[in-house]
Image (cartoon, grey):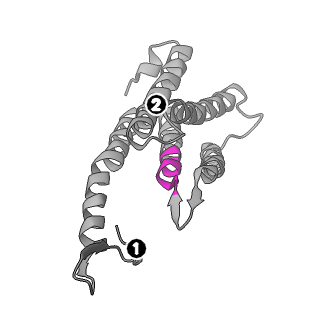
Amino acid sequence: MPTPENFVDPNIVIFGKLVLAMLLGGVIGTERALLAKQAAGTRTFGLVALGACLFVVTGSFVDVAYLGVISFDPLRVAASIIMGIGFLGGGLIIFRGDSLHGVTTAAGLWIAAGIGISVGFGMYSVSIFATLLSLVMFTGMWYVENRFKHWFEVHEFVRPDHRTEMQNENGRTS
């Protein structure tokens, strides 16, 4: 089955992959920057997806250009990207008191890298669908999660002096 790669200059296809990866990562990062107000935003997510795509595309080019001279395993490139993003994401996670912050943003960077990898391998529809699913998780599931927290963590009780207070599971009142 003919693909666009068969009829277009290979550099144009590579440039298109890089731009698509950057845009898809940037879409996820924009949500983080605007709604979650996280330090890692549009530029960070876009660069992570762009970098992941660049590594895959470069590795694929090296494999074709040096066929027989070196061996290329695309899954090793992807695994190395995932491991590197894990370290980057680990640096975003912060403990403040008894709460943990930045885990969702770190997971989002991991997804942005995965999207960049899939664009690099030419899986465009999968990349776009993964971006949409990520946005659903970031925005839509936030509402569901907050509703569950409200239903299961907040309890009303009457104090001995007959004042009503709200108390969470840790015994803190609000």
Residue 174 belongs to magenta span: no
Q: Residue at x 24, y 61 (%)?
A: 147
Q: Quadrant of residue 69?
A: top right
Could you tell me residue 101's position as x and y percent?
A: 51, 56
Q: Single out the mark in the foreground, 2 or 1.
A: 1
* Mark 1: amino acid: Arg
Quick one: label 2 or label 1, which is nearer the N terminus? 2
* Mark 2, other Cα within 10 Å: few <14 / some 14–19 / many ≥20: many
Picture layout, residue 173 above or below residue 6: below
Boundaries of the magenta span:
101-110
Residue 102 belongs to magenta span: yes
Observer-nearest residue: 30 or 117? 30
Instruction: Look at mark 1 in the image and give the residue it sits on.
Output: 172
Dot 1 falls on a residue whose secondary structure is loop
Separation (CA) of disc 2 from disc 1: 39 Å
In which quadrant will I find the N terminus? top left
Observer-nearest residue: 158 or 52? 158
Residue found at the far bottom of this picture: 160
Q: Which mark is residue 26?
A: 2
Q: Residue at x 53, y 50 (%)?
A: 106
Q: Residue at x 35, y 73 (%)?
A: 168
Dot 2 falls on a residue whose secondary structure is helix
* Mark 2: amino acid: Gly
